[in-house]
Each structure stands twice: as structure tokens, then as C-alpha cells.
Image: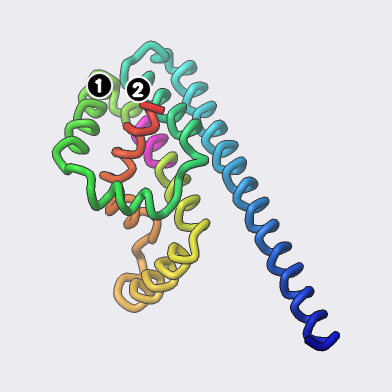
Amino acid sequence: MTEQALSNALHTVISLAALIGIAWLYRGYRIDRLRNDLFAMRDQMFLYAAEHQFLDHPGYRELRKIFNAMLRYSHRLCLSEVLLATWLAPRESEQESFGEWAAMLASLPEEHRNALIDYHIGMLNLGTRFVIGGSPIGWALIAYHSARWAMRRPTRVLSQSLLQKWSGGWQTIERQAGKV
């Protein structure tokens, strides 16, 4: 092996090690950022519930429990897990789970019920952006769907559509996170 070839091999190994190190650090940063955003959203929800005096409401407490579970579980979120949970989750239990929470919210005034639903959707949007943004497969999905929707439906928002498609998987992950 010549000196030039050895030098090139060494530079390649060092560059790959640096790239892996940066990717590892970036993943940690992304997890911290997700948790920070979830904490901020949960705090906003708390302030809203405190201001409108429904901190003891079961629907609020359940959503706060879901937020806490997602905070504990966020380091384990990845695209493959969301996709598997979406495809393998039994549809009936997802609807029952959401239906139970929706029934809890029924006793709240519509304004407060809609606010809690918005916080829940916001949490799922944060999770969806985290999962898709951290995966080369997710980037490819974004590119594909963006091109497809740009040609067919320019007014659709990617994250909302994916959220609707993945809602069952997210509900399964929420239940699993509550058990962790």
C-alpha cells in the first residue's frame, strides 16, 4: 500500500468516525429539542387549564398523563416503530382508547374541549416531525409526498395528512409509553 493510499484510507476512516459522531450528537440534540417542545406545550396546557379552572377534570389529567408518557418515551421514537405500530395495531382498541378520552372531554365546554384536542394534535405533530425528520426514509417520504401533492392537491398539509394516517400507531405508542 502506497503512502497516498494509506493517507486516503486514514482520512476516510477519520471522516466516517466524525460523521457518525456528529449524527449521534445530532440525535441527542433532536431528542432534547423534542422534549423541550413537549414540556413547553404541556406547560401551556397547564396554564390554560389553571386559568379556566379545570385542572381536576379527568380529560385534562388523561392528556397530561399522555404528555408525560411521551416525554419519557421520546428517546425511543423512530420511524420503523411508528410504521409497525400503525400497521399492526388493532383498529378497534385505537378507537376505544380515543373514544374513552373523547367521552371524558364531553363534560367540558366546547372551547376547552377543542383546546385540549388542539394540544393533543400539537403533541402528535411534534412527534411526527421528530420521527420523519430523523430518518432518511422519512426524508424520502417527504420528497415523494411533497412532489405528489404539489401536482395533485397543493392546499394539503403533509404533517396533518400523515397524522391522520398514523393516528392509530400513535395511540398504540401512547399506550405503550404509559406502561414504561
Residue 84 belongs to the span the image colors magenta:
no
Dots 2 and 1: beta carbons under 8 Å?
yes
**Residue position for label 2:** 62
- 76 or 138: nearer the viewer: 76
Q: In this view, does 127 lie above or below 57?
A: below
- Cα–Cα gap, marks 2 and 1: 9 Å
**Residue at the (30%, 38%) spot, across then down:** 171
**Residue position for label 1:** 104
- 129 or 8: nearer the viewer: 8
The x, y position of residue 128, in whole percent, is: 43, 50
The x, y position of residue 88, in whole percent, is: 23, 48
Where are the magenta residues, as a range? Answer: 114-122
Q: What residue type is labelled 2?
A: Glu
Judged from this view, the residue extending furthest toward the right is 3
Disc 2 is placed on an element classified as helix
**Residue at the (45%, 45%) spot, across then down:** 77
**Residue at the (44%, 72%) spot, across then down:** 143
Residue 120 belongs to the span the image colors magenta:
yes
Q: Nearer the viewer, mark 2 or mark 1?
A: 2
Left or right of residue 5: residue 176: left
The x, y position of residue 124, in whole percent, is: 40, 43
- How packed mark 1 is, by other alpha carbons closer than 10 Å (few <14, some 14-19, many 20 or more), is some
